[in-house]
Image (tube, helix red, strand yellow):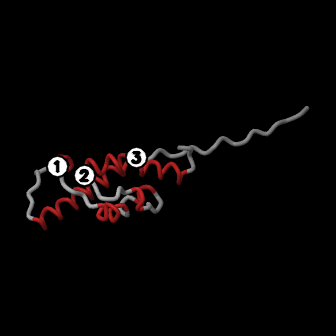
């Protein structure tokens, strides 16, 4: 009688922590926009949600610096290549671009096929 050994099932890949990454990025980006507006004497809307939608330039170098605040959430160093050169037109625009790129990096680092 022959016996066969089954390979263990592949380890489940943890889901991308989208909510935590988005919240951290949004908080940091809004704060950066507030600081820049304060320096330039520009008035902004009262709430973070309104600021996120406001057309303001979000510098790519600022976004690269902000990436380090997300690294503890994802558990690895993030490459500046996920940031679009030239920056973004609003906080929401930055998030729309960054989140899919960060999730792709997560998938590559955690071993899943994209």
x%, y% of residue 37? 14, 61
Q: Measure how far apart labels 3 and 2 are at the Cα level.
A: 15 Å
Asked whether the beta carbons under mark 1 and mark 2 sit within 8 Å of each other, the answer is: yes
Judge the density around disc 2: few (<14), some (14-19), many (≥20) Cα neighbours within 10 Å: many
For the residue labelled by badge 3, is the local secondary structure a helix, a strand or a loop?
helix
Asked whether the beta carbons under mark 1 and mark 3 sit within 8 Å of each other, the answer is: no
Judge the density around disc 1: few (<14), some (14-19), many (≥20) Cα neighbours within 10 Å: some
Q: Which mark is residue 62?
A: none
Q: Is 100 placed above or below 69 here? A: above
Q: Nearer the viewer, residue 36 or 70?
A: 36
Badge count? 3
Q: Quadrant of residue 9?
A: top right
For the residue labelled by badge 1, is the local secondary structure a helix, a strand or a loop?
loop
Q: Is 4 left or right of 21, judged from the image as shown?
A: right
Q: Is 80 placed above or below 101 here? A: below
Q: Nearer the viewer, residue 83 or 22?
A: 83
Q: Measure how far apart labels 1 and 2 are at the Cα level.
A: 8 Å
x%, y% of residue 32? 22, 61
x%, y% of residue 44? 11, 54
Judge the density around disc 3: few (<14), some (14-19), many (≥20) Cα neighbours within 10 Å: few
Q: Measure how far apart labels 1 and 3 are at the Cα level.
A: 21 Å
Residue at label 3?
100
For the residue labelled by badge 2, is the local secondary structure a helix, a strand or a loop?
helix
Q: Quadrant of the N terminus?
A: top right
Residue at label 1?
54
Residue at label 2?
91
């Amino acid at each position: 009688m022959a016996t066969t050994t089954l390979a263990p099932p592949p380890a489940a890949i943890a889901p991308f922590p989208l909510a935590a990454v988005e919240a951290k990025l949004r908080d940091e980006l809004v704060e950066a926009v507030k600081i820049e507006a304060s320096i330039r004497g520009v008035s902004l809307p009262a709430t973070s949600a309104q600021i996120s939608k406001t057309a303001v330039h979000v510098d790519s170098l600022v976004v690269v610096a902000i990436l380090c605040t997300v690294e503890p959430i994802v558990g690895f160093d993030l490459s500046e290549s996920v940031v679009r050169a030239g920056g973004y037109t609003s906080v929401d625009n930055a998030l729309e671009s960054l989140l899919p790129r960060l999730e792709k990096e997560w998938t590559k680092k955690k071993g899943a096929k994209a």
